[in-house]
Amino acid sequence: MPVKVNGQFERSEGTQKRTLFNVNNIRMCSLKYKFIYIDQKPRLFKSSGLAFGSAVHSAVEWFNKRRMQNEETSIDQLLDIFEADWTSLNCDQISDKNGDNQESLFLTVQSLLRLYYDKTNGEKVIAVEYPFEVPLINDKTGETLDLPLVGIFDLVESGPTIADLKTAGRKMIYEDVDIHLQITAYSYAYWMKNNKLPDLRLDVLLKYKTNPKFEPMPTTRTHKDHRVFFNIAKQVICEIQNQVFFPNPGWLCSDCEYRQECWVFNGKYNFKGGDN
């Protein structure tokens, strides 16, 4: 099974086949990773964050493919695509941690898409949703992991620049962007495929209700960063093979679809030595 850096699935012989693990997800909360990818527990509700991000990414992907083909696109066309995706997600059934209703969330996404459209329209696009698979190698020691790194570049612009889109409810700082694991994985993958370090950018759509913002945050990576990623991937493999899964209590918990399953909140410690 390949190591993946995003939540996509690979298709094999007409069936959907999940990856063994997702580096990004397991670093955020390995217990939630277990619920999703190993136990395959159903989500107890649709979180607003998941619905929000899915609708935005789908509309932005459509827009960027139009840009790549040099096709003129109006903001109204982009918003129409978003509205269709939003309706298909059945967003009236989502659960929002801030108590926002569907109309409020809908208007917020529209505002963010307008910002994205205004800031990015005109940039040269090389590739959109471009898949990759590369071996995981420590360039200093030559050690190679048994699993390849598999993922998808959201957007490749001239430069080259690898851009990843993120919707967030709070402002990110550059210190976080400079150690963002998924961006490091993209840098490594591009280097392995092209023998060149790309420019990198995290495009952050801040879903503030009163004043939504779009913040492009450029960053860089070195081969030293790639070796750090290699070591993290190696450790993650070890944790999964040894069935080491634990929660990571924090602000993400308030919007987690598995909150009732988590022993941090329900007090049911279903493991040897747990205090029941």
Image (tube, helix red, strand yellow):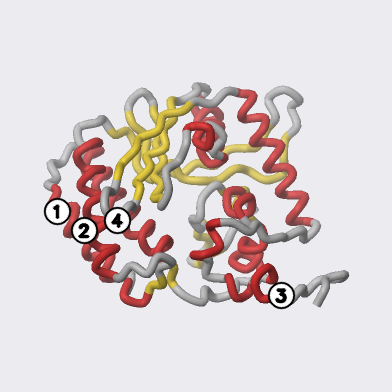
Q: Secondary structure at mark 4?
A: loop
Q: Are marks 2 and 1 in contact (CB under 8 Å)?
A: yes
- Camera-nearest residue between 73 and 13: 73
Mark with earlier residue (2, 4): 2
**Residue beneath the point at 32% across and 59% down:** 55
Q: Inspect the image, locate mark 3, and give the three-letter code of the amino acid beneath it.
A: Gly
The answer to whether residue 24 is visible is yes
Residue 81 bears which disc, if any? 2
Q: Inspect the image, locate mark 1, and give the three-letter code of the amino acid beneath it.
A: Gln
Q: Secondary structure at mark 1?
A: helix
Residue 77 bears which disc, if any? 1
Q: Where residue 233 sits in the image (x, y, percent)?
A: 68, 43
Q: Are marks 1 and 4 in contact (CB under 8 Å)?
A: no
Mark with earlier residue (3, 4): 4
In this rendering, is residue 10 above or below 163? below
Which quadrant is the C terminus positioned in? bottom right
Q: Nearer the viewer, mark 3 or mark 1?
A: 3
The answer to whether residue 20 is visible is no
**Residue beneath the point at 23% across and 36% down:** 119
Q: Where residue 170 sits in the image (x, y, percent)?
A: 42, 48
Which quadrant is the N terminus positioned in? bottom right
Q: Inspect the image, locate mark 2, and give the three-letter code of the amino acid beneath it.
A: Ile
Q: Secondary structure at mark 3?
A: loop
**Residue beneath the point at 50% across and 60% down:** 11
Residue 209 bears which disc, if any? 4
The residue indicated by pointer 3 is: 267
Horizontal relation, residue 87 to residue 267: left or right:
left
